[in-house]
């Protein structure tokens, strides 16, 4: 601080201000990578929670309405896509005919569009693209794993067993994403 001259308010010199700004810039530069990692993990956790909640709601709907309910990846056009990439969104629809597409727009219960940040990717395991819940809540077919990746690193997985229950699993160590 400079010495107060009579009649002038106390303040900082330009050199002191520049020193504070330099120290602040260094600290910000050190904290930014950590903040980006926290932000990536939070986005991944949010996406996994959102999708597992949708899976659980679809299961509950199948049980309560006593009708099959299907979840499938979608591009937001009201149709299921034939690829295992769920990143652009997904459909939840009543599926009494057990078809690969909703029978009508009225059958669609939810059309989730752009649910995850652009840096994240959700891809289902090979051989199984959709989840179909039977009226008893069971998921027909084999187990399904949805892999959530960011920057070619596995952030987590959602596993749906034959009983229809979704479960979240996060890797304990840095793990590369499975190849698609």
Image: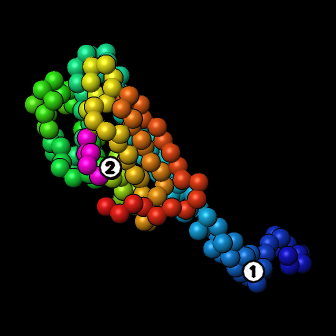
Whichever of labels 1 and 2 marks the residue nearer the N terminus, that label is 1
Q: Quadrant of residue 63?
A: top left
Q: Quadrant of residue 9?
A: bottom right
Image spot of residue 149 (x, y percent)? 42, 58
Q: Residue at x 48, y 55 (%)?
A: 155
Taking the image as shown, residue 135 lies to the left or right of residue 15, namely: left
Residue behind mark 2? 124
Marking on residue 19: 1
Q: Residue at x 88, y 75 (%)?
A: 4
- The residue closer to the viewer here, 7 or 113, is 113
Q: Residue at x 55, y 62 (%)?
A: 174
Picture quarter with the C terminus? bottom left
Image spot of residue 141 (x, y percent)? 27, 35
Distance, label 1 to label 2, CA atoms, is 52 Å
Q: Which stretch appears magenta?
A: 125-130
Image spot of residue 108 (x, y percent)? 19, 31
Q: Point out the residue furthest to the left here.
A: 104
The question of residue 19 being in magenta is answered with no
- The residue closer to the viewer here, 70 or 112, is 70
Picture quarter with the N terminus? bottom right
* Vertical comparison of 148 with 67: above or below: below
Taking the image as shown, residue 160 lies to the left or right of residue 46, namely: left
């Amino acid at each position: 601080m400079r010495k107060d001259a009579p009649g002038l308010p106390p303040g900082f010199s330009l050199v002191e201000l520049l020193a504070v700004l330099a120290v602040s810039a260094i600290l910000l530069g050190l904290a930014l990578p950590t903040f980006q990692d926290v932000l990536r993990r939070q986005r991944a956790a949010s996406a996994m929670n959102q999708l597992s909640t949708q899976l659980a709601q679809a299961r509950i709907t199948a049980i309560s309405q006593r009708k099959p309910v299907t979840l499938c990846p979608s591009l937001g056009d009201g149709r299921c896509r034939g690829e295992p990439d769920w990143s652009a969104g997904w459909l939840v629809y009543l599926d009494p005919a057990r078809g690969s597409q909703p029978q009508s727009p009225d059958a669609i219960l939810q059309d989730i569009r752009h649910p995850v940040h652009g840096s994240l990717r959700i891809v289902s395991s090979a051989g199984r693209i959709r989840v179909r819940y039977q009226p008893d809540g069971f998921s027909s077919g084999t187990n399904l794993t949805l892999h959530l990746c960011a920057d070619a690193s596995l952030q987590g997985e959602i596993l749906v067993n034959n009983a229809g229950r979704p479960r979240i699993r996060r890797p304990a160590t840095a793990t590369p994403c499975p190849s698609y």
